[in-house]
Amino acid sequence: MMHNVHHMADGAQDVARKVGALNERNIVDHAAFAAEYQVNVERFWSKVDRPSPQSCWEWSGALNKGYGQFHVGRSSSSVMLAHRIAYGLANGKLPEAVCHSCDNPRCCNPAHLFGGTRADNNLDMTRKGRHAKVKNAIRGEKHPQAKLTDTEVAAIREKYARGGATQRQLAARHGVCQRTIAKAVLGISFKNVARQWVMN
Ligand SMILES: [Zn+2]
């Protein structure tokens, strides 16, 4: 009996070791990305729960509107969304939109994240949310992490209300996540933009 218990414990440790190895293989630490964004990589991953390679890796640190957030930059003066850092560390680059295939905003598993790029790239860098300071009171396109302009949101709301496109089609066209379109058409975001076509 003692032997069996001991054997089971060894088995569990083996599984844990294998899961750990798989996790480490999934995380490609692109040093250039970490250096550019001044990310403390070890501290970052210490805040990500990784129960298995396939599961959602939920952020255990601070949240901002459901998304994990992490301080980066010199003397940790700036914040970035945790799933964007996870994507950047795994892929060595950061597209304008990083979307969740699992629809779990806290998830930082690179296997559940995919990038989108918008056709219109000649935008002010400050609007890309890179090293953006936290400014909760700012609404609409003036928000440093806004991915859409007020004009785009007005057009998206009208097109969606008239049945001209699905949320997924609008997301692809504007290079943002479907979740971003959903919040815009429901009037959860961009409260400053005319509500004539808001769907509620
Ligand atoms: Zn996930």
Image (tube, grey):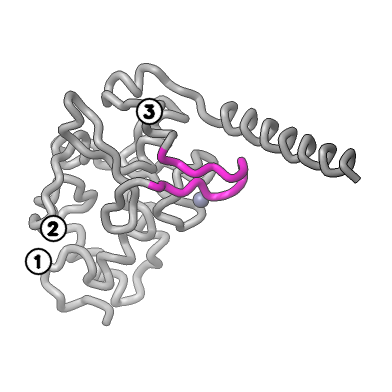
- Which image quarter: residue 3? top right
Task: Confirm whether the magenta stretch covers residue 14.
Answer: no
In space, the residues marked 2 and 3 are separated at their CA atoms by 26 Å
Using residue 193 as the reference point, say whether residue 110 is left or right of it.
right
Specify the principal SS of the magenta part.
loop
Q: Which residue is mark 2?
A: 140
Q: Which residue is mark 1?
A: 192
Residue 3 is tagged as: none
Q: Position of residue 133 (x, y in %)?
A: 14, 40
* Labels 2 & 1 near each other (Cβ < 8 A): yes
* N-terminal-most mark, 2 or 3: 3
- Which image quarter: residue 79? top left
Disc 1 element: loop
* Labels 2 & 3 near each other (Cβ < 8 A): no
**Mark 3 within 8 Å of ligand 1, using the beta carbon:** no
In space, the residues marked 1 and 3 are separated at their CA atoms by 32 Å
- Which image quarter: residue 95? top left
Tell me which segment is drawn in magenta.
47-60
Residue 93 is tagged as: 3
Where is the C terminus found, in terms of image quarters? bottom left
Q: Position of residue 70 (x, y in %)?
A: 29, 39
Q: Position of residue 162 (x, y in %)?
A: 30, 77
Residue in the picture at 39% in, 52% down: 172
Amino acid carrying mark 3 in the image: Lys
Amino acid carrying mark 1 in the image: Asn
> How would you rate the neighbour count of disc 3 (Cα within 10 Å): few for under 14, some for 14-19, many for 20 or more?
some
